[in-house]
C-alpha cells in the first residue's frame, strides 16, 4: 500500500488546568490515495483531534503527519494555510457556512485564499461552483442564505465548498449528524460518488453505522489509540474486546 | 462575486448593520467637528495672513493717542480720529535702514446730500510714495493713478466706472480690490490724499455735515518698509527719539495677538476632539471585540478553508478601514454642509468678535480633507488592532468540534 497520508507516533496532550488529557497516544496511520476511511469510536476517544491534526488545524504534541511526502507541521502558518486551501476540503458537523454570504458565495469562499500565482477568471470559478451545486441539486437555491436552508441543504453547500478548489482529500467530522435517515443516505451517496468518480481520498468521522457499508477502511478509536481491521466494529463499539 | 478578502469584508459589513451605524454616527460626528473647526480656524488665519501681508509694511508710525484704535482699526476698520504732521515722513525717510515711507489719512464717512450712501472707510494715500495699495491693482503698472480716481474694497457696493461722492468731492471708481476678509480693506475707499484735504475743506463750509478736522498737511499714520537686514528695535528707537509724541507698531505684533487668540481657541477645540477620538477608539475596540467573539466559529471556518493568520488580521482591518473611511466621508460632508448652511451667521458672529474670515484656498481644503480621512482611519485602525489580534489567535480546531 503506497502511503498518501502517513502519521508517525502522533500524540496530542491537552493541558486542562493541572490535568493532562491525552487525546492521542501514539497514532501510526497510513492511508492510501482514493481510500474511503471511516473513523468510529466513543465520544472523547480522540477522533476530532486526530482528523484536525491530519488536516493541519491542531498542532500535535509529538510525532508527524506527512501528506504526499510533505511534513505538514514543519510548514509555517502561511504555507500550511495554503496547503489546506489547495489539498484539503473540510466539512464540519453543522453551522459551518458563513451567515453573511449566500449559497453561491459560500461555495466560492475558499477561492479567496488561493495562493497559486495565476488567478482563475471569476467566470470560470462561478461556472464550476454552479455545476457543483447543480450536481448536488442545489442550483435553485444559489441566492439563499444559510439560515434559509434545511440541515441537509446546508450539508450539500458545505460539500460543494469542500470541492471548489479540487482538493485531493476530503476531511469530514460528523457530516451527517442530526440528519434524518433518508437525508443521511443521500449525503453518504454523494461522498461515495466523489470517492469513486473523482478518486478523492475521503476521511470521515461519524457515530452513524450507515457509513460502514460505503467505507473501504474502518478505524475504531479508543482512548486515543486506533484499532484497524476490527472484525466486527459494532461489537467493538459496544465495548467488547478489541485488540490492537 | 466575493472573490477577494476585501469583498468579504464589505459583505460582512452589509450584514452587521447595527455596529456599522453606531460607528458611522460616532466617527462622523468627530470627523465633522474636526473638519469644520479646522476650516474655520484656517480661514481666520488665512485672512489674517492675506490682509496683513497686503500692508507690505514692517512698521506703522501713528500718534500715541491712536494706538489702541489702530490695532482694532486693522481688524475692524474703525478709523482713528488722531492726526500727525506729514513732515514727520521726510525725517523717517532719511533714517538709515528705511526703504520706503508712505502716509495715509483716514476720514470718517458721513451720510447726507454731500455723500453717497454706504458705510465705508475713507482713506487718502499718496500715489507718489505708496507701496501698499497700488501694488494690488494690476493696471497700476501701466497706467498712472488718476487724480480723481478711487480704489474700492471688495465689500463696497460700487463697481468699476461708478461715480461716487464724499463731502462734495467726486471720484470715479478706477479699481476694485479682491476680498481680504479684513474689514478695513474690504470696506475701504482709497483716493488721492489731496482729495482728502479737499473733503476736509468742503466740510468746513457745508452746513449739512459735521465738519472734519483741519487736515491740510496732516496724516493719520505712516507706513514704513525697512531695508533687508534693518534692525526693527534700532529704527523704532531712532524714530521715537526725534518724535516723542509718536508710537511705532510692528505689524508682526498685530498679527501675533490676533493669531494667539484664535490659536488658543483652536487648541481648546483640539483638546476636546482628541478626547472624542480617544473615546471613539475605545468604542470601536469594544464593538469589534464583541464582533470577533461572536464570529469565532466563522473565523475558524475561514481559517480551515485556507486563510492564514495574516489573512484574518487583514480581514478585520479591512472591515474597520471600510467603516472608518465611509464615516470619514460622511462626517466631512456633514461638517461641510453645516458650515455652508451657517456660513452667513458664522461670518457675522466672527465679525462681531472682530475676527476676519475667508475660506482657505482649495489646496489647504484638500489637505484638510485628507487629514480628516486620516483621522477617521486612525480611529478605525487603532480601535480594531487589538480585536484583530484576538481574531488571529482563534483556534480553527475549536470549530471542528461540535456544538460550538
Ligand atoms: N481544546 C481542548 N482542550 C482540552 N481538552 C480537549 C480539547 N479538545 C479536546 N479535548 C479532550 O480531548 C479528548 C478527545 O477529544 P475529541 O474532541 O478528539 O473527541 P471525539 O472523539 O471527537 O469525541 P466526540 O465523538 O464527542 O466528538 C477529550 O477527552 C476531550 O475532552
Ligand atoms: Mg468529535
Image (spheres, rainbow, N blue to C red):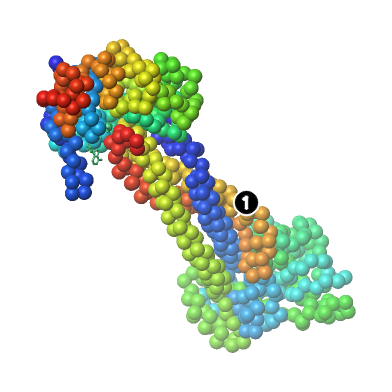
Res B45 quadrant in image:
bottom right
Question: Label 1: chain?
Answer: B
Residue to which mark 1 is pinned:
B337
Q: Nearer the viewer, residue B215 or B309?
A: B309
Q: Position of residue B344 (x, y in %)?
A: 69, 59
Q: Position of residue B2 (x, y in %)?
A: 44, 30
Task: Establish if B30 lies above or below B54.
Answer: above
Q: Residue at x 51, y 49 (%)?
A: B22
Residue B7 appears left or right of B236: left
Could you tell me which secondary element the residue under label 1 belongs to? helix
Q: Residues within 10 Å of mark 1 (few under 14, many from 20)?
A: some
Q: Quadrant of the C terminus of chain B?
A: top left
Q: Residue at x 60, y 78 (%)?
A: B61
Res A136 quadrant in image:
top left
Q: Position of residue B235 (x, y in %)?
A: 52, 79
Res B49 quadrant in image:
bottom right
Amino acid at each position: 500500500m503506497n502511503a498518501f497520508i502517513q502519521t508517525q507516533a502522533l500524540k496530542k496532550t491537552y493541558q486542562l488546568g493541572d490535568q493532562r488529557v491525552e487525546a492521542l497516544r501514539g497514532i501510526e496511520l497510513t492511508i492510501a490515495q482514493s481510500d474511503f476511511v471511516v473513523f468510529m469510536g466513543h465520544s472523547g476517544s480522540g477522533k476530532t483531534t486526530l482528523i484536525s491534526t491530519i488536516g493541519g488545524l491542531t498542532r500535535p504534541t509529538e510525532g508527524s503527519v506527512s501528506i504526499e511526502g510533505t511534513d505538514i507541521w514543519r510548514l509555517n502558518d502561511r504555507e500550511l494555510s495554503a496547503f489546506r486551501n489547495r489539498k484539503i476540503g473540510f466539512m464540519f458537523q453543522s453551522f459551518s457556512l458563513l451567515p453573511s454570504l449566500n449559497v453561491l458565495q459560500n461555495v466560492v469562499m475558499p477561492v479567496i485564499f488561493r495562493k497559486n500565482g495565476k488567478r482563475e477568471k471569476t467566470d470560470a470559478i462561478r461556472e464550476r461552483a454552479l455545476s457543483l451545486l447543480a450536481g448536488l441539486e442545489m442550483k435553485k437555491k444559489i441566492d439563499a442564505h444559510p439560515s434559509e436552508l434545511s440541515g441537509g441543504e446546508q450539508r450539500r453547500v458545505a460539500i460543494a465548498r469542500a470541492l471548489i478548489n479540487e482538493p485531493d482529500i476530503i476531511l469530514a467530522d460528523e457530516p451527517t449528524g442530526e440528519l434524518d435517515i433518508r437525508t443521511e443516505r443521500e449525503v453518504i451517496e454523494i461522498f461515495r460518488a466523489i470517492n469513486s468518480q473523482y478518486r478523492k481520498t475521503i476521511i470521515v468521522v461519524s457515530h452513524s453505522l450507515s457509513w460502514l457499508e460505503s467505507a473501504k477502511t474502518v478505524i475504531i478509536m479508543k482512548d486515543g489509540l486506533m484499532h484497524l481491521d476490527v472484525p466486527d466494529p459494532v461489537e467493538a463499539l459496544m465495548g467488547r474486546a478489541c485488540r490492537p | 462575486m466575493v472573490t477577494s478578502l476585501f469583498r468579504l469584508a464589505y459583505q460582512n459589513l452589509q450584514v452587521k448593520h447595527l455596529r456599522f451605524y453606531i460607528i458611522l454616527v460616532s466617527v462622523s460626528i468627530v470627523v465633522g467637528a474636526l473638519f469644520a473647526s479646522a476650516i474655520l480656524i484656517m480661514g481666520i488665519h488665512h485672512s489674517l495672513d492675506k490682509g496683513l501681508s497686503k500692508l507690505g509694511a514692517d512698521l506703522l508710525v501713528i500718534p500715541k493717542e491712536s494706538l489702541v484704535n489702530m490695532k482694532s482699526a486693522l481688524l475692524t476698520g474703525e478709523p482713528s480720529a488722531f492726526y500727525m504732521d506729514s513732515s514727520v515722513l521726510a525725517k523717517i525717510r532719511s533714517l538709515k535702514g528705511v526703504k520706503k515711507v508712505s502716509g495715509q489719512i483716514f476720514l470718517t464717512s458721513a451720510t447726507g446730500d454731500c455723500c453717497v450712501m454706504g458705510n465705508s472707510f475713507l482713506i487718502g494715500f499718496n500715489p507718489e510714495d505708496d507701496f501698499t495699495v497700488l501694488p494690488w491693482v494690476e493696471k497700476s503698472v501701466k497706467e498712472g493713478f488718476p487724480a480723481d480716481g478711487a480704489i474700492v474694497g471688495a465689500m463696497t457696493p460700487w463697481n468699476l466706472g461708478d461715480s461716487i461722492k464724499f463731502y462734495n468731492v467726486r471720484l470715479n471708481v478706477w479699481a476694485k480690490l479682491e476680498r481680504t476678509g479684513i474689514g478695513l480693506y474690504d470696506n475701504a475707499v482709497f483716493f488721492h490724499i489731496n482729495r482728502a484735504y479737499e473733503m476736509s475743506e468742503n466740510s468746513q463750509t457745508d452746513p449739512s455735515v459735521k465738519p472734519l478736522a483741519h487736515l491740510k498737511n496732516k496724516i493719520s499714520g505712516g507706513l514704513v518698509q525697512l531695508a533687508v537686514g534693518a534692525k526693527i528695535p534700532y529704527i523704532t528707537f531712532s524714530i521715537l527719539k526725534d518724535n516723542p509724541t509718536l508710537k511705532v507698531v510692528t505689524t508682526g505684533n498685530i498679527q501675533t495677538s490676533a493669531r494667539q487668540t484664535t490659536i488658543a481657541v483652536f487648541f481648546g477645540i483640539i483638546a476636546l476632539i482628541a478626547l472624542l477620538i480617544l473615546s471613539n477608539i475605545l468604542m470601536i475596540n469594544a464593538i469589534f471585540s464583541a464582533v470577533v467573539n461572536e464570529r469565532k466559529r466563522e473565523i475558524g471556518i475561514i481559517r480551515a478553508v485556507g486563510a492564514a493568520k495574516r489573512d484574518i488580521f487583514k480581514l478585520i482591518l479591512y472591515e474597520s478601514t471600510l467603516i472608518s473611511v465611509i464615516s470619514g466621508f460622511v462626517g466631512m460632508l456633514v461638517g461641510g454642509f453645516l458650515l455652508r448652511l451657517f456660513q452667513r451667521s458664522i461670518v457675522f458672529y466672527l465679525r462681531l468678535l472682530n475676527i476676519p474670515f475667508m475660506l482657505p484656498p482649495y489646496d489647504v481644503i484638500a489637505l484638510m480633507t485628507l487629514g480628516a480621512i486620516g483621522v477617521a482611519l486612525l480611529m478605525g485602525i487603532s480601535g480594531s488592532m487589538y480585536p484583530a489580534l484576538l481574531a488571529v489567535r482563534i483556534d480553527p480546531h475549536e470549530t471542528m468540534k461540535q456544538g460550538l
